[in-house]
Image (cartoon, helix red, strand yellow):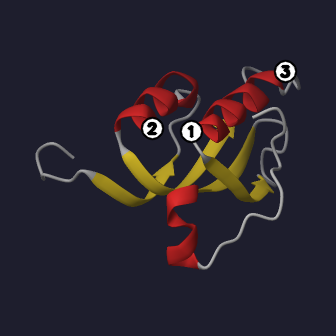
Amino acid sequence: MKLEGVDSIEILKIDIEGAEYEVVIPFLEKHSVCQILIEIHIDGKSTNYDKVKDLLMQIAKLDYFLFNFEINPFAPFIATEFSLIHRSCFRRYGAVEIARYLNNV
C-alpha cells in the first residue's frame, strides 16, 4: 500500500492460514477497508470456537458488520469464511443494518 500510494481498500480478501489472529486487528486499526472477506482458522484440531468469536467481536468493535458466512465444506472444523462490511460503506452498497449478529459490541 505504501509503495503504491494506496490509503484505502475497497475489498480485502484475507486467507493467511491462522495468522489472522495476530495481523487483522492491527491492520484494520491503521487502514481503511470497505469490505473484508476473511477465512478464519480454528487453532489446531480443537472445536473450541472462542478464539474465532473473539476475533469477530474485535472486528465488529471497529464498526464492521457481518453480512455472510460460509463453513468450508472441505474443512468444516478447521476454517470458516466470513464477509463483513464497514458501516461507512453501507450507502455505497445499498446495505442497511437490520440487527447486529455479534452481540455485546
37 lies above or below 22: below
Instruction: From the top left corner, tell me how far across and down residue 8 is, in percent.
Output: 31, 54
- Asked if residue 1 lies left or right of residue 94, the reply is left
- Asked if residue 96 lies left or right of residue 4, the reply is right
Residue at mark 1 to residue at mark 2: CA–CA distance: 8 Å
Q: Secondary structure at mark 3?
A: loop
| 1 vs 2, front mark | 1
Instruction: From the top left corner, tell me how far across and down residue 14 is, in percent.
Output: 50, 46
The residue sitting at 84% across, 38% down in the picture is 103
Q: In this rendered view, identify the residue nearer to me: 41 or 102.
A: 102
Q: Earlier in the sequence, mark 2 or mark 3?
A: 2
In the rendering, which numbered label is found on residue 46?
A: 3
| 2 vs 3, front mark | 2
Residue 90 occupies which quadrant of the picture? bottom right
In the rendering, which numbered label is found on residue 2?
A: none
**Label 2 crowding class (10 Å Cα cut-off): few <14, some 14-19, many 20+?**
few
Q: Is residue 45 visible?
A: no
Q: Do the numbered discs 1 and 2 sit on residues whose CB atoms are within 8 Å? A: yes
Residue at mark 1 to residue at mark 3: CA–CA distance: 27 Å
Instruction: From the top left corner, tell me how far across and down residue 20 is, in percent.
Output: 54, 31
- Asked if residue 29 lies left or right of residue 45, the reply is left
From the image, tell me which residue sits under label 1.
62
Q: Earlier in the sequence, mark 1 or mark 3?
A: 3
The residue sitting at 61% across, 79% down in the picture is 94
